[in-house]
Amino acid sequence: MLLRFKSSWELQESASTPESVFMDRRRLVRAMSIAPFLGIGTTLPYRNANAVMADPTKRFYPANRNPLYRLDRSLNTEKDVTTHNNFYEFGSHKFIAKEAQKLKTRPWTVTLDGMVEKTIVIDIDKLISKMELEERLYRFRCVEAWSMALPWTGFPMADLVKFASPLKGAKYVIMETFHDPDVAKGQKQFWYPWPYQEGLTIEEATNELTLIGTGAYGKPMVKQMGAPLRLVVPWKYGFKSIKSIVRFTFTDKRPVSFWEKVQGQEYGFWANVNPAVPHARWPQDTERVLGGGGRRVKTLLYNGYEEQVAQLYRNLKGENIFF
């Protein structure tokens, strides 16, 4: 007999969001997308509808949901998630959705270089078409002590690493976002080390949870969330999930990431969620649930994904892995 033990974040089946309910919502979204042509009034989260309609990858959505990844809480609404966004390239406040529409996501190329068999420069649509997209329900925990839960669409980063064919000596992956100060005014702030860079170990990059996000809520990624390609690492604080990626560089040297350069005493390389380790300026033992009317819940070690990732850090010595 095949026995399957529940992962640490899972509820009983009866307590999870029913598939029929979520699919009904998808059908409603599809109906709303044609409402302007039928003369029906609608209220949607802020998004650039024309850009979404023009996305050549839209035929891949909605992707099949991977049933292994369930949540212990309700999904946030799409409006919650698309109107409260950190994206410093477009401003240091949370309400950058309108400003982010200036980002041009086509044409868009992705470079895989460094310690690889051969440098690859590939069009984003061709890259996505090579990958098997799936939907996963994940928690998201910001270092600022707020949280949300949402349905990401994407593909395992392990598949991207395999596609890149890194050399045996490669130990890290550096990710880099776009750099265009004429479009992203925040990049004119010279005191920040643009372009935004983040890094993972190869082991973290190929962990089962690590996702390259291409969409959410059954649709291609909207710009304020990091279109057309972003990192999703649910056991780490949100600043690790770099947005609008243009380059993956494989290296044997540990990178210094964006916020580590800005304030290394508060934002380190690892940034794993731990309620027992406070930030320098606030506690991390609880979190405010986005859209929850100020409701706070207890924060979980590794954001609830300890079973899947704790082994990555057991042999590290002299490292503060929780900031």
Image (cartoon, rainbow, N blue to C red):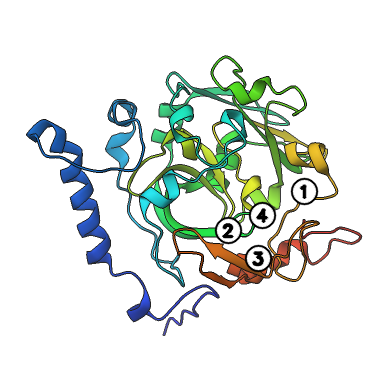
Name which quarter of the figure residue 75 lies in: bottom left
> Where residue 249 appears, x then y in whole percent?
69, 31
> Where residue 153 appears, x then y in whole percent?
41, 48
Residue on which disc 3 sits: 302
**Disc number placed over residue 267 in the picture, else none:** 1
Q: Residues within 10 Å of mark 1 (few under 14, many from 20)?
A: many
Front-most of residues 166 and 228: 228
Q: What element carries label 4?
A: loop
Q: Do the residues labelled 2 and 4 touch (CB within 8 Å)?
A: no
Q: Residues within 10 Å of mark 4 (few under 14, many from 20)?
A: many
| Viewer-nearest of discs 1 and 3 | 1
Q: Is residue 283 left or right of residue 54?
A: right
Residue on which disc 4 sits: 143
Q: Distance between the residues labelled 4 and 1?
A: 9 Å
Q: Is residue 252 left or right of residue 74?
A: right
Q: How crowded is mark 3: few (under 14 residues within 10 Å), some or many (20 or more)?
A: many
Q: Is mark 1 on a helix, strand or loop?
A: loop
Q: Distance between the residues labelled 4 and 3?
A: 12 Å
Q: What element carries label 2?
A: strand
Give whichever of discs 4 and 1 has the lower sequence position: 4
Q: Do the residues labelled 2 and 1 touch (CB within 8 Å)?
A: no
Q: How far apart are marks 2 and 4 (CA)?
A: 7 Å
Q: Which residue lies at the image location 67% right of the left edge and 52% below the top edge? A: 204
Q: Do the residues labelled 4 and 1 touch (CB within 8 Å)?
A: yes
**Disc number placed over residue 146 in the picture, else none:** 2
**Amino acid type of the residue tagged 3 in the rendering:** Tyr
